[in-house]
Amino acid sequence: MAEKNIDKLLAQTGSKYTLSVVIAKRAVQLRAGTPSVLPNEQRVKHRNLVTVAMREMATDKLSIGEGLIDEERLTGDLHKQRVAAEKAAQERNYSNEE
């Protein structure tokens, strides 16, 4: 996609992180069988589901609702991953010291 279109998508979401999460979630929905809002000829032209999701957003045919991203769960999951990574690093350091 052209840089101009990426800027438009960023304006819709407010951040690169939110944009990537929204696009990824939409691609997962498409893969699960949710119909695309793009005309059939555009869907066939862009077989990559991430590209289809980005095109949907770029044409303002995809609205971002609050249910698309569960911020609390996402924050909790990220915290759990960080704690697990820190614990694993500590265990590696402890075993290297012995």
Image (cartoon, rainbow, N blue to C red):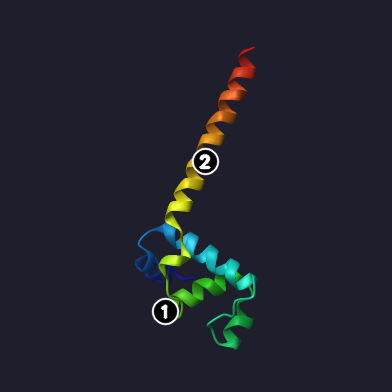
- Identify which residue, 22 or 52, lies in the foreground: 22
Looking at the picture, does residue 50 appear above or below residue 93?
A: below
The percent position of residue 19, horizontal first and vertical second, equals 44, 62
The percent position of residue 43, horizontal first and vertical second, equals 60, 81
Tag 2 residue: 80
Q: Kindly identify the amino acid type of the residue bearing the numbered disc 1.
A: Asp
The residue lying at 53 percent from left, 31 percent from top is: 86
Looking at the picture, does residue 24 appear above or below residue 61?
A: above
Q: How much space separates mark 2 and mark 1, taking CA atoms?
A: 35 Å
Which numbered tag is attached to residue 60?
1
The percent position of residue 90, horizontal first and vertical second, equals 56, 24
- Identify which residue, 32 or 52, lies in the foreground: 32
Q: Earlier in the sequence, mark 2 or mark 1?
A: 1
Looking at the picture, does residue 45 appear above or below residue 65?
A: below
The percent position of residue 2, horizontal first and vertical second, equals 46, 71
The residue lying at 53 percent from left, 83 percent from top is: 38
The residue lying at 48 percent from left, 52 percent from top is: 73
* Viewport quadrant of the C terminus: top right
Q: Residues within 10 Å of mark 2 (few under 14, many from 20)?
A: few
The residue lying at 50 percent from left, 76 percent from top is: 55
Q: 10 left or right of 20?
A: left
**Mark 2 touches mark 1? (CB < 8 Å):** no
The answer to which quarter of the image holds residue 44 is: bottom right
Looking at the picture, does residue 16 appear above or below residue 51?
A: above
Q: Secondary structure at mark 1?
A: loop
Q: Secondary structure at mark 2?
A: helix
Q: Residues within 10 Å of mark 1 (few under 14, many from 20)?
A: some
Q: Kindly identify the amino acid type of the residue bearing the numbered disc 2.
A: Lys
